[in-house]
Image (cartoon, grey):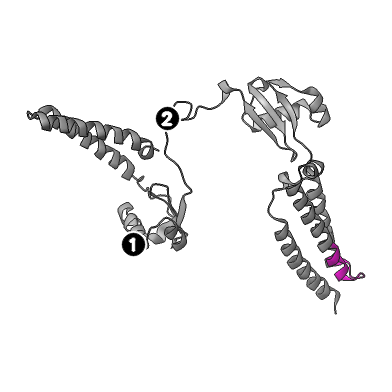
Amino acid sequence: MQEWLEVALRTLTAVVILFVLTKLLGKRQVTQLSVFEYITGITIGSLAAYISLDLEANWYLGIVALVVWVGVSLGAEFLQIKSKRFRNWIDGKGTILIKDGKIMEDNLKKERLSTDELLEQLRRKNAFRAADVEFAVMEPSGEINVLLKRENQPITPRHLGIKVGPEQEPQTVIMDGVIMDEPLATIGLSREWLKTELEKLGVAQENVFLGQVDTYGQLYVDLFDDLIKVPEPSQKAALLATLKKCEADLEMFALSSEDKEAKEMYGRCSEVMQEVILEVRPLLTG
């Protein structure tokens, strides 16, 4: 067999085996790898190159080495799941860099982290002053996570005592002009409903680059033709306006009615409608 053909066959074999073995190891970003996993990844890559190019050696020995390395890595991951002590030994522990607003200089030296590097990492977390940080920790992966002081944290609806509606994963129902039936079925909608919504927006299915349906059944589309402006969905705003009009009509009936019982009935209905509006407002204004 010619050398170039043998190299090609070995490389294809290594790629297939490497793909299968890495699928077994799971998904992790490089920044999430422990030192052991990083070394394992480098070694596996080197072994794959050995299988492809070292024509003087038996190629199956490289595959044996690959399998052993992956087996060891899988075993280590299993032990990490089962044992906190083993996990600490392999991954290490997080190091506190700032505590109670005070920089821990000894821990910075322990992690060989300079002041400039610390400030850079803080800026990545939108903390441009060390004085704004209550707590910061370097994770075993090397990432630094930051807790800002209470007065520097962004205001959320919870801080203001505002109740907001739950938000679920939006479903992509059109992609590259093609309707996706599975996401539609997941949210209990049909192609006929989707086509009706597209007609309301005045766009053709073929012109839709991306279409998504949110938690409340509103369709948002992005078109291939960026010059065409699509109106924002207004069903929630229209529903809220209708509820307010109903409440105002009931209150007007209560004020204008001369019949005592009717006045009381309209008054009670108006109060109930006000409570309903308060309950659904977070859902209709999100």
| Part of the protein shown in magenta | 53-65
The question of residue 63 being in magenta is answered with yes
Q: Residue at x 48, y 48 (%)?
A: 169
Task: Using the rendered view, name the quadrant where residue 25 is placed.
Answer: bottom right
Mark 1–mark 2 Cα distance, whole angstroms, equals 37 Å
Q: Is residue 258 above or below residue 203?
A: above
Task: Using the rendered view, name the quadrant where residue 105 is placed.
Answer: top right
Say which amino acid is labelled 1.
Glu
Q: Earlier in the sequence, mark 1 or mark 2?
A: 2
Q: Is residue 135 above or below residue 202?
A: above
Q: Residue at x 66, y 19 (%)?
A: 131
**The N terminus sits in image quarter:** bottom right
Where's residue 17, x and y in %? 76, 66
Where's residue 186, x and y in %? 45, 57
In the image, is 96 to the left or to the right of 223? right
Q: Residues within 10 Å of mark 2 (few under 14, many from 20)?
A: few
Cβ atoms under marks 1 and 2 closer than 8 Å: no
- Closer mark to the observer between disc 1 and disc 2: 2
In the image, is 270 to the left or to the right of 24? left
Residue under numbered circle 1: 192
Dominant SS of magenta comes to helix
Where's residue 237, x and y in %? 31, 40
